[in-house]
Image (cartoon, helix red, strand yellow):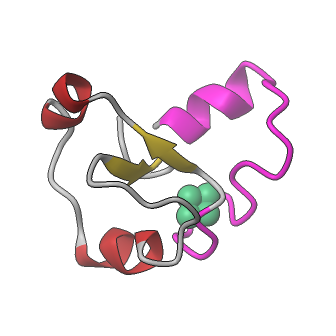
């Protein structure tokens, strides 16, 4: 997942991935360009529910801990 990449590469995004991928925080909120968004896998109900709480939600938003 994108969260795995951030962790493995030790990228310093303050607060990113606070719940460590358990779909409990939305700090891993990412906004994709339209073309990239369409290539992502399907979105699960739990991800959708957590995304609803994300700041600045868009129609191409996903959780970084859920997309590969
Ligand atoms: Fe918390 Fe993705 S890391 S929802």
Position of residue 43 relative to residue 51, above or below, is: above
| Main SS category, magenta section | loop
Is residue 20 visible to us here? yes
Q: Nearer the viewer, residue 8 or 47?
A: 47
Q: Nearer the viewer, residue 42 or 38?
A: 38
In the image, is 53 to the left or to the right of 11?
A: left
Position of residue 32 relative to residue 58, above or below, is: above
Q: Position of residue 47 (x, y in %)?
A: 36, 69
Q: Residue at x 13, y 35 (%)?
A: 38
Q: In the rendered structure, does residue 24 fall within the stretch colored magenta?
A: yes
Q: Nearer the viewer, residue 60 or 1?
A: 60
Q: Residue at x 23, y 35 (%)?
A: 37
Q: Position of residue 64 (x, y in %)?
A: 49, 45
In the image, is 9 to the left or to the right of 38?
A: right
Range covered by the magenta-colored residues: 2-26
Position of residue 20 relative to residue 65, above or below, is: below
Q: Position of residue 43 (x, y in %)?
A: 22, 60
The picture quadrant where one finds residue 7 is top right
The picture quadrant where one finds residue 68 is top left
Q: Position of residue 52 (x, y in %)?
A: 42, 76
């Amino acid at each position: 997942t994108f969260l795995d990449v951030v962790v493995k590469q030790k990228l310093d995004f303050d607060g990113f991935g606070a719940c460590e991928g358990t779909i409990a925080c939305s700090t891993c909120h990412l906004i994709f360009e339209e073309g990239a968004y369409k290539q992502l896998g399907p979105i699960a109900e739990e991800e959708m529910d957590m995304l609803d709480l994300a700041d600045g939600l868009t129609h191409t938003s996903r959780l970084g801990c859920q997309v590969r």
